[in-house]
């Protein structure tokens, strides 16, 4: 693919490279050694590309195609720059302006303020092994692999009202500097894809705002469509966030780290 790089794409190429290094395991020196190499030639596998797609969607509200593996970093940057300028590539739903409301995929965003300092909220909510004690919906967590800031794990839920036990494998990468987390389902089940982005921001009174963004698309024939899943997530997510808030605030009080509500 031949790319004519404008100033926006040139700057984005550096940012895309940083994303690949921070989130996808790219060797920081590889792009300089082979500037014309495709992502596949740089060693980016399908899981790395899923992570790249998730971060690009979250950060730039842009979508990059499934054939990204055959593109160079410069070509990816050019695509993202074009969408930011309004030249979306195909029907991109929430990642661009080409698709109408009926065509967009699922998206939810929920946030809650936790009366505890950010380091404590970060520590507790990112200890995946303890999630069955933190969430009410998970029966067990099995850690399958850890590498760098990434953990792959199997989540198993409590039986639903019909007695069905849902279980799947997810992968989660934390960014301790940006205080962000990117995750996706590896075993997607009824989803074409499910990507999750958590953000943590300090509030002026010392408390912490925790925001969860979920982007997904259900497979044809799934029990729910995207709108139905949005409704379910927008009902359940605030409930789980409230449970987590209460548990973290209790722990903060026990550690003498509670936020002063009088300020």
Image (cartoon, rainbow, N blue to C red):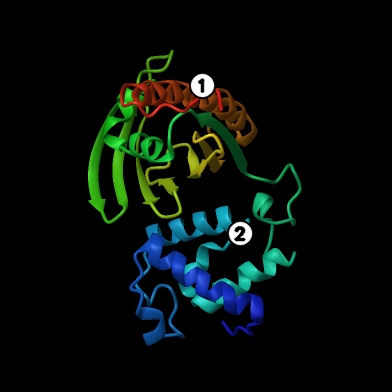
For the question of whether residue 135 can be seen, the reply is no
Rendered-image quadrant of the N terminus: bottom right
User: What residue is rendered at 43% in x and 73% in y?
Assistant: 39
User: What residue is rendered at 65% in x and 70% in y?
Assistant: 81
**Residue 189 vs residue 43: left or right?**
right
Rendered view: 104 above or below 137 = below
Identify the mark at residue 239; answer none if there is no mark: 1
Rendered-image quadrant of the C terminus: top right
The answer to whether the residues at label 1 and label 2 have Cβ atoms under 8 Å apart is: no
Q: Which residue is mark 2?
A: 60
Q: Position of residue 110 (x, y in %)?
A: 58, 34
**Residue 68 vs residue 84: left or right?**
left
Label 1 to label 2: alpha-carbon separation: 29 Å
Write down the quadrant of residue 57 in the picture. Answer: bottom right
- The outermost residue toward the top is 161
Q: Nearer the viewer, residue 104 or 145?
A: 145
For the question of whether residue 42 can be seen, the reply is yes
Rendered view: 94 above or below 107 = below
User: What residue is rendered at 41% in x and 24% in y?
Assistant: 249
**Residue 224 vs residue 32: left or right?**
right
């Amino acid at each position: 693919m031949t790319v004519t790089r404008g100033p926006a794409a040139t700057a984005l190429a550096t940012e895309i490279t940083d994303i690949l290094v921070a989130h996808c395991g790219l060797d920081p020196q590889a792009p300089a050694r082979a500037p014309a190499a495709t992502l596949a030639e740089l060693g980016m596998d399908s899981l790395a590309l899923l992570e790249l797609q998730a971060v690009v969607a979250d950060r730039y509200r842009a979508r990059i195609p499934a054939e990204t593996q055959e593109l160079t970093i410069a070509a990816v940057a050019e695509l993202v720059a074009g969408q930011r300028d309004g030249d979306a590539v195909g029907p991109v739903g929430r990642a661009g302006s080409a698709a109408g409301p009926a065509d967009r995929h699922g998206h939810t965003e929920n946030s809650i303020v936790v009366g505890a300092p950010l380091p404590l909220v970060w520590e507790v909510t990112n200890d995946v092994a303890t999630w069955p004690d933190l969430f009410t919906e998970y029966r067990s967590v099995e850690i399958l692999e850890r590498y760098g800031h990434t953990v792959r794990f199997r989540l198993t839920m409590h039986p639903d009202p019909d007695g069905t036990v849902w279980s799947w494998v997810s992968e989660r990468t934390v960014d301790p500097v940006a205080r962000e987390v990117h995750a996706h389902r590896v075993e997607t089940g009824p989803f074409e894809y499910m990507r999750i982005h958590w953000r943590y921001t300090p509030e002026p009174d010392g408390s912490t705002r925790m925001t969860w963004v979920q982007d997904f698309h259900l497979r044809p024939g799934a029990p729910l469509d995207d709108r139905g899943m949005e409704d379910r997530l927008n009902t359940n997510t605030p409930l789980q966030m409230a449970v987590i808030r209460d548990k973290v605030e209790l722990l903060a009080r026990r550690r003498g780290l509670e936020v002063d509500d009088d300020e």
